[in-house]
Every structure is written in structure tokens, then in C-alpha cells.
Image: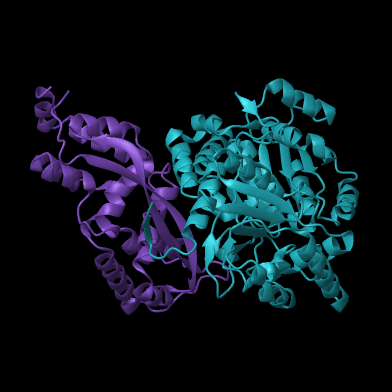
């Protein structure tokens, strides 16, 4: 495979996966964006789904000839502690927020508003952290501002939502991953699901030797069924619930559980949750709690997912859950909570299994492990669904369509 | 080469879509029908075709989003069956299709003893789609060109010329039949292509079925005799 730009895949490499017509469509749409600059702004360059997605979208759109930039706001740890609370509160979790927290947010926003240069004609601002950038709107009259929300805000803490709404309503449009995540807003709400890059280190095909090396590094037995969950160490991902489900599975099946996580720069809670998970795992045989080094994250996650017999995502709340997308793309049977964007990816019993509690998760895991042909069918359907709907090329296409549609009227647009 | 119809070639277009939330949600069949009465035609079109586009590898899949929701969220199996068995191909406009959907739901509600609500979070979310029409590199001057293009063109092009053209663009006939009749002068083949039900195929199978009908027709022989 031809690779350049520091090991990243080229557009032509995608033809064998999505077809030449899809790539040609992208080239055509890019040609229609000539003369317009797109800018993406978020809060971190590494860790988490948004940074991962932008690290692939931006170079490929640049290869298509689109003038595009990716910038990151600068802020201190106190700010990220507050925005983590906001994140949890927007997901509907109970959070103790003080007036001081809101003051910290406003002070940091004033600072990043000064230090962030707005250079796009169309500016995508991702999630709540940089949302106050819209205060630059008055001095950027011809710029179209889009707020891209990756969070399920269907039942948020009203105090946080009201605080953020004042900013959101200033945008020209918003984007959500699912209609279920939307809130009544005065601005248009476009629906664009996230996507994975099938040629990234985390998703591309892998030699068995590499898989074995990674298993050996972490002392995981290749011969014993592997149940895994990949996610940062976060209460909303319910790693403790996964251990509880595993204990129920272990009564009947001699399997092993691998919890795989890393840390993200904008997630200050990770270390505490990891400590708690390790405590809960004490005394439970065959549980591996892994903290992957960022530099090895993608290849090791790829290997561990490929080695898995079943992949779990027992989240309490989710944005879209790209870890589910990754697992389905690898044709793995997935057992996942029916929350956030997961039901968009899994049609229960067709392309995976949905669950609602620890006991349900355990039952589904046992069913998959005891029925290999059923597991294979779920995996196959899952991969087909991802290929059609959740690969990077579709995401790039919709970003360009959104940029093209701003200011357009009518339901049918001839390009 | 078969004789070329240089005056009126068939230009293959394709389409891509961008979805937008309407913000409208229905909790039960009564709310569903009330909203259906008012939403733009693109909303009706989207929900009647979304499974065809997103789950094309699964056959059979639930035929439309209204039927799927009635069964999965409301537990109204009979309503799901009534909605699922609407023969979409019998309607030439979204307006007529909308009227049929309304008739089915209101007929069901007239006889219903109670109205079930969907659980919180399972409401029906009304979505509209904006269609962007794009040119492709494929042009057909005769049946040979058409078959060659059909083999290679993006699946979105088949979707566009069969479903969008007929119903959403209000042409009342699929584009292939229209061109074969009016430009090539093969009305019998055109009628045959218009007569089969594309809603019971996956999009890829639809592609092969159209090719199959053309290549097994007497007109294909006439077309090749002109070589």
C-alpha cells in the first residue's frame, strides 16, 4: 500500500474499500468548495474520538484540494476540570457545579478567544470546550459558524445547558450525531454521524504475528476466549459493570476479560477511575486492566480487538461510541448498551446484541461465545453496515455537503 | 458498435444526501399522523426509503421507518404490517403517498381501543434530507452503453434514477424506462422495466435485475443486430 504524509493513507488507497465512484464524488464536491477555507477547532490534538477523527479528516480533505486548518484552543487544567464536569452534566449525570466553575469557564474562554486565530470562511467548533469562540462572530461577519456537538444532550443538567445555549444560539447551524441527541434550538440541526478510518493503525488489517506480540506483551492467553472493552477509564463507560458481567460469564465459560484504556489530555478523572477499576478487579481471575501508552495505542487496540472473541461496550451514556464502529468493522460480535449512538450502529440480533443491564450483558456474551456461527453472522452484518454508513469517506462527504449547503435553499440541489 | 442515439443520450447522475432534524417527535400513532400531515415531502420520502439506503445488505429488512417504529417502539404489530405493506411503487407523487399513509394510520386509529405511547427516548424523530445531484462520467447512447454503465455506475445513481426520479422529482416513471421509450423507441422494454417492483430488492440486486431484464429482451437482440 502506498503511504506518505508521515504514514497516513492516500485517497486512492480507499478505492479498494469504498469504490472508485465514492472517491470521485469526493473529488467533485471538493472542486465545488474552491475558494472557501474550512477551519476546525477543538480542545485537544490527541486522545478521544474527536481528535482522532480530525487527525484523519483534515489531511484527506487537504489532499482533495480543500483549504482546511485544524486548531486547538489553549487552556489550563482548571478549565478542563470544569469542562469535564460540564461533559458529565450534559450527559445527565449529577455534578456539583459552583459559581466558581462557571467563572473559570468564562475567564478561560476570554483567554482562548484572544489566542485563537479565526481564519476559516466556515468554522466548525467541536463540543462545549471551545464553544465561546462564537463571541468572535461580530468581528468575522462573513464567516459561517457551525457548532459540532459529539455529546448526547437529550437530557442535560438544565443549568449547564442554559449556560451553553446562550453561545449555541449564536451559531449559524449545529450538527449532532443522532436525532435522539438534539434539543429544541432556533438554529438548523444537521445530522452527521462520526466515522472511522478503515486504513488507520487502529482499523487496518493486521498480521497474526503482530497480534500475538501484543497479547504476549500483556500476558494474555490466545487460547482462552477474550472478552474486551476499549474505552477511556470513565464512569460513563461502566468498566466496573463489565467486571460484574464478566464474573457472571465466568461461572460457565473459562474466558478472560481485557479492559483496554488510555488517557486523554482533556480528561482529568481517568486516573481515579482506573484506580477504582483495579480495586474491583482484585481477586477476579483472568481480568487484565490495561493502560496503553499513547504512542502504542492504535496498533495495540487494533491487535486486542482482533484477538477478541466478543467485544463489549457497556456504557451508561455514550456519544456515538466509535469503539463499537471499530469492533463491527473487524467483523466482531458486539454486545453493547442501547444508549447514545449505539442503536444507530447495531440493529439488535442483526448486526450485534443490545443490552440494558449487567445480567443482560452477561447473558448476551454467553450466547455469543456458545454460538460461533451466530457470532459470525452478527460480525459479517456489522461490517457491511459500517462500510455503507460509518467510514471516513462518508463523513468527509457530509462535511463538504454541509459547507456547500449553508445559504442554499430547497431540498434538491444540483451541483 | 450498436447504433448511437446522438440526439438524446442518457446522462447518468447520482445523488448524495445530508440529513437535518426537524425537531419534531411523535410519541404515539396519533401524534405520528398529525405530524405527517404537515411535514415537507422530503421528510416523507426520507422515512419511506431510509432502510433501503442504509441497510441495503439486509433482505428482507423492515420496508419503511414508520412501520419499523410502530412495531419496535409502540408494539403495534398490526399497524406496522399495514404501513409496511403500502405498495410505494403504486404512487407517482409524494403527496399521493402521504395521503395513503395518513389513510392507513387514521383507519387503524378509528378501530383502536387504546393508544400506546413509545417509552421515553423511543419517540419517532422526523428527519428531512437534502439531496445533492451530481453528474457522473457515464453516458449511454444505446442499450449496450446503458448496460455497461449500469454495471459500473455508483449504486446511488441507480437509487436516483429509479426511486428519486419517479417519486421525489415527480416524473412518475423511472428514468431508464422513460429514456428507453422516448429516445430509443422501445415501449415494450420500457414498460417491462417499469412493471417490476424495485422495493423488494436490495440496491445491488436491483442493478443486476435491470441489466438482466434489458439483456433478456428482444430489443437487446435488435440493438446488437445494428452492430
**Residue beneath the point at 82% across and 65% down:** A111
**Residue at 77 percent of width and 37 percent of height:** A297
At 20% from the left edge and 39% from the top edge, which residue is drawn? Answer: B9
Task: Name the residue located 77 percent from the left edge and 40 percent from the top edge.
Answer: A257
Count the marks: 0
* Quadrant including the N terminus of chain A: top right
Q: Is residue A201 left or right of residue B31?
A: right
Residue A393 percent location from the top left of the image: 53, 42
Rendered hue of chain A is cyan
Q: Measured along the vertical axis of the image, is residue A403 above or below residue B117? A: above
Say which of A353 and B18 sits in front: B18
**Visible in this render: residue B159?**
yes
**Closest to the observer, A309 or A11:** A11
* Relative to A173, B56 lies left or right: left
Residue A120: x %, y % from top left:
62, 56
**Colour given to chain B in the rendered image:** purple
Choose between A201 and B89: the one closer to the eye.
A201
Image quadrant of residue A378?
Answer: top right
Visible residue check, residue A155: no
Amino acid at each position: 500500500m502506498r503511504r506518505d504524509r508521515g504514514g497516513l493513507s492516500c485517497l486512492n488507497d480507499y478505492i479498494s474499500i469504498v469504490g472508485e465512484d465514492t472517491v470521485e464524488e469526493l473529488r467533485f464536491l471538493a472542486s465545488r468548495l474552491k475558494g472557501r477555507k474550512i477551519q476546525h477547532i477543538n480542545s485537544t490534538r490527541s486522545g478521544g474520538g474527536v481528535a482522532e477523527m480530525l487527525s484523519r479528516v483534515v489531511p484527506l480533505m487537504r489532499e482533495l484540494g480543500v483549504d482546511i486548518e485544524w486548531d486547538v484552543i489553549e487552556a489550563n487544567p482548571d478549565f478542563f476540570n470544569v469542562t469535564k464536569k460540564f461533559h458529565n452534566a450534559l450527559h445527565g449525570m449529577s455534578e456539583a457545579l459552583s459559581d466558581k466553575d462557571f467563572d473559570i469557564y468564562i475567564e478561560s474562554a476570554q483567554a482562548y478567544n484572544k489566542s485563537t486565530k479565526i481564519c476559516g470562511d466556515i468554522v466548525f467548533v467541536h463540543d462545549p470546550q471551545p464553544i465561546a469562540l462564537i463571541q468572535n462572530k461580530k468581528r468575522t461577519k462573513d464567516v459561517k459558524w457551525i457548532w459540532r456537538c459529539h455529546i448526547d444532550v437529550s437530557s442535560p443538567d438544565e443549568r449547564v445547558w442554559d449556560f451553553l445555549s446562550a453561545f449555541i444560539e449564536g451559531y449559524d447551524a449545529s450538527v449532532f450525531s443522532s436525532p435522539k441527541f438534539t434539543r429544541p434550538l432556533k438554529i438548523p440541526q444537521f445530522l452527521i454521524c462520526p466515522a472511522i478510518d478503515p486504513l488507520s493503525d487502529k482499523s487496518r488489517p493486521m498480521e497474526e504475528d503482530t497480534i500475538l506480540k501484543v497479547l504476549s506483551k500483556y500476558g494474555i492467553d490466545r487460547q482462552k476466549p477474550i472478552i474486551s472493552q476499549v474505552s477511556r477509564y470513565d464512569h460513563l463507560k461502566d468498566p466496573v459493570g463489565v467486571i460484574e458481567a464478566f464474573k457472571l460469564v465466568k461461572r460457565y465459560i473459562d474466558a478472560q476479560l481485557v479492559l483496554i484504556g488510555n488517557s486523554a489530555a482533556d480528561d482529568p478523572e481517568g486516573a481515579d477511575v482506573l484506580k477504582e477499576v483495579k480495586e474491583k478487579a482484585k481477586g477476579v481471575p483472568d481480568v487484565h486492566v490495561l493502560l496503553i501508552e499513547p504512542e502504542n495505542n492504535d496498533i495495540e487496540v487494533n491487535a486486542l480487538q482482533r484477538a477478541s472473541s466478543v467485544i463489549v461496550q457497556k456504557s451508561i451514556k455514550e456519544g456515538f461510541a466509535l469503539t463499537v464502529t471499530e469492533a463491527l468493522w473487524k467483523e466482531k460480535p458486539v454486545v453493547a448498551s442501547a444508549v447514545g449512538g449505539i442503536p444507530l450502529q447495531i440493529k439488535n440480533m442483526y448486526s450485534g446484541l443490545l443490552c440494558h443491564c449487567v445480567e443482560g450483558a452477561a447473558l448476551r456474551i454467553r450466547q455469543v461465545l456458545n454460538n460461533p456461527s451466530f457470532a459470525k453472522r452478527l460480525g459479517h452484518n456489522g461490517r457491511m453496515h459500517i462500510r455503507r454508513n460509518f467510514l471516513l469517506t462518508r463523513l468527509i462527504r457530509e462535511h463538504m455537503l454541509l459547507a456547500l449547503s449553508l445559504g442554499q435553499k430547497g431540498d434538491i440541489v444540483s451541483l | 458498435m450498436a447504433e448511437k442515439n446522438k440526439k438524446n443520450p442518457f446522462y447518468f447522475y447520482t445523488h448524495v444526501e445530508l440529513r437535518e432534524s426537524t425537531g419534531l417527535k411523535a410519541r404515539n400513532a396519533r401524534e405520528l399522523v398529525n405530524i405527517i400531515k404537515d411535514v415537507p415531502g422530503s421528510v416523507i420520502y426520507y422515512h419511506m426509503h431510509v432502510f433501503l439506503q442504509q441497510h441495503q445488505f439486509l433482505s428482507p429488512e423492515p420496508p419503511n421507518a414508520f412501520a419499523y417504529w410502530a412495531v419496535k417502539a409502540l408494539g403495534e404489530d398490526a399497524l406496522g404490517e399495514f404501513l409496511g405493506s403500502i405498495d410505494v411503487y403504486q404512487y407517482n407523487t409524494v403527496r399521493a403517498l402521504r395521503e395513503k399513509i395518513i389513510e392507513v394510520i387514521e383507519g387503524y386509529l378509528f378501530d383502536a381501543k387504546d393508544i400506546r405511547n413509545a417509552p421515553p427516548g423511543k419517540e419517532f424523530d422526523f428527519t428531512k434530507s437534502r439531496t445533492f445531484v451530481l453528474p457522473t462520467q457515464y453516458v449511454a447512447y444505446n442499450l449496450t452503453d446503458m448496460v455497461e454503465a449500469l454495471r459500473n455506475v455508483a449504486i446511488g445513481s441507480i437509487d436516483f434514477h429509479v426511486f428519486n426520479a419517479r417519486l421525489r422529482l415527480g416524473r412518475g416513471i423511472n428514468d431508464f424506462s422513460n429514456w428507453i421509450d422516448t429516445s430509443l423507441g422501445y415501449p415494450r422494454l420500457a414498460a417491462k422495466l417499469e412493471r417490476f417492483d424495485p422495493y423488494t430488492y436490495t440496491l445491488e440486486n436491483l442493478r443486476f435485475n435491470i441489466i438482466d431484464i434489458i439483456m433478456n429482451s428482444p430489443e437487446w437482440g435488435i440493438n446488437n443486430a445494428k452492430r
